[in-house]
Amino acid sequence: SAPICAMLCTFVGSSSGLLPPAGNHVIGVQSMAVKLATPLLLFNADMRRVASGGSRLLPAFGLALLGSVSGAAVGVAALHAHLFAALGDDGLKAA
């Protein structure tokens, strides 16, 4: 699609030196371009197809979510003393 082609051309141009090196103005324009390209990609999407394909991925996403949360909980429980010693009381609250 057009947004992907535009991002690809920009990547090739910046990698080959055809475009100037990244400065504050380039980073701002790039950020705005990506923010505009994302909705354009979604407008071109078939939401019925996305919903039917997503329903098959939902159990895998739930399993990954459960694994991530339980792994984090086990890690904090197992390393609580080390985390407290390294981060202190305020650091542990922030983490």
Image: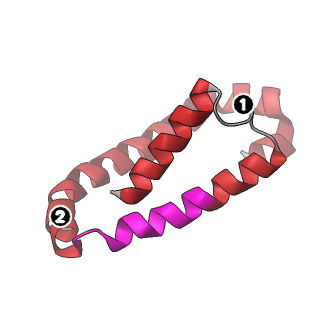
Helix, strand or loop at label 2? It is helix
Q: Say left or right for 32 vs 46.
A: right
The residue that mark 1 highlights is: 83
The local crowd at label 2, few if under 14, some if 14 to 19, many if 20 or more residues have their Cα within 10 Å, is few
Residue at figure coordinates x 20%, y 70% from the top left: 51
Percent of width and height locating residue 68: 43, 42
Residue at figure coordinates x 42%, y 68% from the top left: 40
Residue at figure coordinates x 41%, y 49% from the top left: 5
Amino acid carrying mark 2 in the image: Ser
Amino acid carrying mark 1 in the image: Leu
Percent of width and height locating residue 4: 40, 51
Please provide the residue range marked out in magenta: 33-46
Q: Is residue 72 above or below residue 43?
A: above
Quarter-wise, where is residue 80 in the image? top right
Q: Say left or right for 24 vs 75.
A: right
CA–CA distance in space, label 1 to label 2: 39 Å
Quarter-wise, where is residue 35 in the image? bottom right
The residue that mark 2 highlights is: 55
